[in-house]
Image (tube, rainbow, N blue to C red):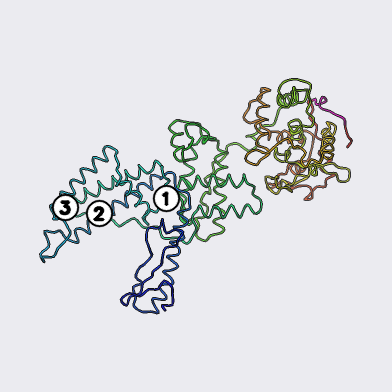
Amino acid sequence: MTGHPRLYCRKGTYYHRAAIPVDIKETYPKSEETFSLKTKDYREALKRVRVAAASVDRLFEEHRHKRNSPATDELTSEQLKHIQDVYYAHLLEEDEEIRLDGFLDDADDGSLQFAPTFDEYGELLEDALDYNKGQLARGRSDVFLHAEAEEVLTWDSVNLKLAPGSPSWRLVERELLKATVRAYRDNRKRNEGEVVETPLLPKVTPRSDYPLLSVALEDWITERSRSSWKEKTASEHRVWISHFLATVGDRPIDQYRKVDAKAFKTALLSLPSNWNKKNVLKGLSLANAAEVARAADMEPMSDSNLNKIIGFVAAFWNWADSNFDDVQSGLFKGLKIKRTKSVREERDPFTMEELRKVFNVPIYRGCKSLRFWKRPGKLVPRDAGIYWVPLIGLYTGARLGEIIQLYVSDIKEENGVRYFDINEDGEDKRLKNRNSVRSIPIHQDLVQMGFLDLVESRKKARQKRVFPDLKAGDDGYYSSPFTKHFRRHLESIGIKRDTLVFHSFRHTLEDACRECGVAHDVMDAIQGHGEEGMSARYGRGYTLRRLNEEMQKIKYSGLDLSHIVHSPSGT
């Protein structure tokens, strides 16, 4: 018994010997992991084999992760140059070994050597140099070069996984050709007696005990999804971190540096909004799409969108920094673009004239049908979501998703005050943050318009949601389809400013609050603001009665909505 399943003794010397695990046997580059422990002492061998076994197990796990991880779509110019340098050093090292072994015409002991003569080696060298120079000049490749590229990418000093069909394969092959021409020219100098040093192989990145980015990403998403994250949130983060991974490569998470974050930002700076939906960019990697977009002088995405993407990726690295010892701290710190506009400046409030247009359309005056809501007719769809959601936005400043996801049970009464209970108590609900949980008194104008009658009819019909006709989009968000509807609504009445969206109702309410003397802190509590200096919600500073008193002060002087008033059901 050797005392360890991997300890193996041969001719008095101890070895580590391990079979390749079945699940990676077909793709692992060796048939077994066998190597000398360089000792004949049993006790010392037992110590060394334990260390060696742990190291080999890490190799197996790295191979397993690498095999299952997504491949890189495109290599950076730095990676390609590194490949050339590694291959160049490898070829010079091969040449040096040949010279150290000696040429056939130098043998004087009568032994049989499988080696060329010096002249034969020189001729082979010249032929190979001419051939490779021709291939390089013509931009050609061959089967050998592609096979060599596949091999080089697996070397420890390179260790890259490139997607099949990636355009970077041709670039790798070209770098190998460049290295070959450089090396053969230097070998020819050696034949002439000149000193050409074999460069040290570029430093091999030390093997890491940390998980690959692709593996850590899934761990992070699993952890976050246990609490606050919904499917779309997880999907957005996974998509953009995967783009980061494809741009700079999948490595153990302790091996990323600021230069990787800056390379990703540089690519983003050239990308247009919705880049993957544009025909000329469809199917391209993010880095390739950025190059094409830059060459075509496409308008780049807005600063706010770019900052949002950086925020997605930075969130992962903040988590990694908190959960692992040697992860680069502040990888994306300082990379967001400084905004020249405030959030308020990016979204305008509606003017009084615009509000008149919004609420004097066929939906509120009479339309042909829900399908043909732009055409005048006799139908006033008082039980439809498209009728009520803008009105509630006007009188609450609530976010679009908060309104559409309301349950019938969220319309409550306490001490004679009717209110919206904004919460996320439901699998299909989601809020922006914890400060979004709040109570908003129902404005008397909404009551007079018949909103409580609508709620009562939903109760009688045993409906769960106040607006069951408004379905969630493919992304799981109720707000997505309505955002498109509201954009069409604004365009149909001649309002086409980019800074006017449904969110503009929040700023419109803010202006109305100031105009009507509503206390600023109360306004913040109603809107669910949670930034420093802002009040919290009902239950953390203001009673529902006080909030209601302030809410009922809000008026929109100059906005006539008398055509919307229905049968009041009381206060």
**What is the quadrant of residue 219 in the picture?**
bottom right
Q: Amino acid at mark 2?
A: Leu
Q: Amino acid at mark 3?
A: Tyr
Q: Quadrant of the C terminus?
A: top right
From the image, give the main secondary structure of the stretch colored magenta.
loop
Q: Nearer the viewer, mark 2 or mark 3?
A: 3
User: Is tag 2's residue or tag 3's residue first in the polypeptide sequence?
Assistant: 2
Q: Which mark is residue 518?
A: none
Tell me which residue sits at (21%, 54%) in the image.
196
Residue at label 2? Answer: 92
Q: Is residue 562 magenta?
A: yes
In this view, 332 is above or below 449: below
Inter-mark Cα distance, 2 to 3: 14 Å
Tell me which residue sits at (43%, 68%) in the image.
53
Q: Nearer the viewer, residue 191 or 533?
A: 191
In the rendered structure, the answer to whether residue 301 lies left or right of residue 388 reads left
Q: Determine the residue located farthest toward the top in the rendered image.
A: 376
